[in-house]
Amino acid sequence: MPSKIPRTRIQKKNHETILEAALDVFSRHGFRGATLDQIALESGLSKPNLLYYFPSKVSIHRALLERLMTNWLDPLYKLDANGDPVEEILAYVLRKLDMAREYPRESRLFANEIVQGAPNIADQIEGELKALVDDKAQVIKGWSQAGRIANVDPYHLIFSIWATTQHYADFDAQVRKIIETDGSSHFDDAGVFLNRMFRQMLAPDA
Amino acid sequence: MPSKIPRTRIQKKNHETILEAALDVFSRHGFRGATLDQIALESGLSKPNLLYYFPSKVSIHRALLERLMTNWLDPLYKLDANGDPVEEILAYVLRKLDMAREYPRESRLFANEIVQGAPNIADQIEGELKALVDDKAQVIKGWSQAGRIANVDPYHLIFSIWATTQHYADFDAQVRKIIETDGSSHFDDAGVFLNRMFRQMLAPDA
DNA sequence: CCTCACTTTGACCAAATGGTCAAGACCACG
DNA sequence: CGTGGTCTTGACCATTTGGTCAAAGTGAGG
């Protein structure tokens, strides 16, 4: 039963195919709303074949979340304690906005999961994610105390960055209905807006 | 079949009971994840009894969304074109934050719906919501052009307010795991943070 | 080209789920 | 207190859905 790490070429390919299809389906319908039949259809494999590679529906979901967590955390991970504070944070904002633009399915997958209480990902949030956030919050706090940026709560700063950037992926349906735009140029406008907003709030002193 | 407006006392009461239970269940599990059995259990009514008052599961969901839309739009509706620009917008932010604090289930209900493409609420977003947002965006734009607030894109301003405030309701599970707080005092901290952020960005000129 | 492990699938299953229905319980009102 | 409408429910149904399994197909190394 090839449940853990794929070994053969075929396993590697099909693992990949399944996760790709599952990302699509789970991100559109949430865990409960997604069905194995949809994933099977979209991946071009038969349902029993899915279950040859993964022992259960929930295991596919978990594998997806685990696989994505690293990339998800990467933009924050890159925040450099030795860089220029304001520019570091703004670069982080733009990286997150790019993620929302380039990987909306991933964003919605996480959104679905967390809105419903993070039943399948609680460990990773309390573990990896919290550790990273705590670490970077310390960095930001250091910058505040050194007077290099304004004195803001680092946790709420991070939350506000997550909220404003992911909003464009997670609530895309709403955004699109309110500002009818042909292309996805609203991401560019959002970039301008967020750059301005965070730059102003981080400017040292007042 | 008492599907439209409740008439008798019993109908009024049970309609209410069902919607209350449905809000709880739908907001926790999303439309697809919620089951009539759960709603029946939580409302204390039998499943066939639910379907005596509502013709289908989706009709309960729609009734909920419609009923909540008014309250949902209310904070923005109250934004007064004749008030002081900065204070009006900040008051709006705080009203939204209070909504997230007091009515997290409602917030998550909408979040679930919109993340999944707003299949059941598209009309109201394109209709009521868009009209209201367009109207208030004009007000804000007027303030910008009069130099009474900084020159910011009103739509993205509104999005950023939605995103940052609703985040505390919709992503509560995550917030709570990252800042372990006994009470819900993080709402107060968020209020301080958001007040500062939006005040700074709205300050006229630069 | 043979063998053996790996891969694939049609048929099937049990449980869950949205919904129906006919019969009974309840309630208001004359 | 009887009657007609309102309300409630146990039993039932069709479909969907996650998951199983035995049997058949396939591919790579000897």
Image (cartoon, coloured by chain):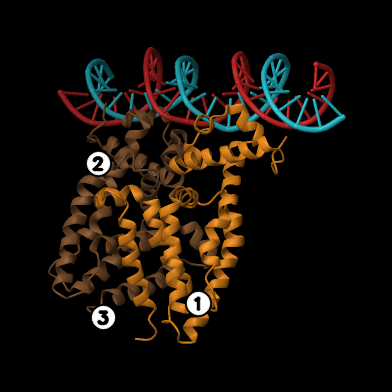
Chain colours: A orange, B brown, C red, D cyan
The spot of residue D17 in percent (x, y) is 52, 30
Residue B35: where, in percent of width, then height? 45, 35
Is residue A55 something that shows in the picture?
A: no
Q: Secondary structure at mark 1?
A: helix
Q: CA distance from mark 2 to mark 1?
A: 43 Å
In the figure, residue B31 lies in which quadrant? top left
* Residue type highlighted by circle 3: Ala
Marks 3 and 2: same chain?
yes
Residue B203 visible to an observer of this rendering: yes
CA gap, disc 3 and disc 2: 40 Å
Please report the residue visible at 35 percent of the width from the left and 30 percent of the height from the top: B56
Q: Which residue is mark 2?
A: B123
Subunit bearing disc 1:
A
Say what amino acid the circle numbered 1 marks.
Ile
Eye-nearest disc, 2 or 1: 1
Quadrant position of the N terminus of chain B in the picture: top left
Instruction: Using the rendered image, report if marks 2 and 1 lie on a common chain.
Output: no
Residue B206 shows which numbered tag? 3
Query: Residue, x 29% and y 39% (percent of image)?
Result: B63
SS assignment at label 2: helix
Q: Dot 1 corresponds to which residue?
A: A140
Residue A144 % position (x, y): 47, 82
- Where is residue B159 shown, x and y percent of the image? 31, 59
Which dot marks residue A96? none
Please, what is the three-letter code of the amino acid marked with disc 2? Asp
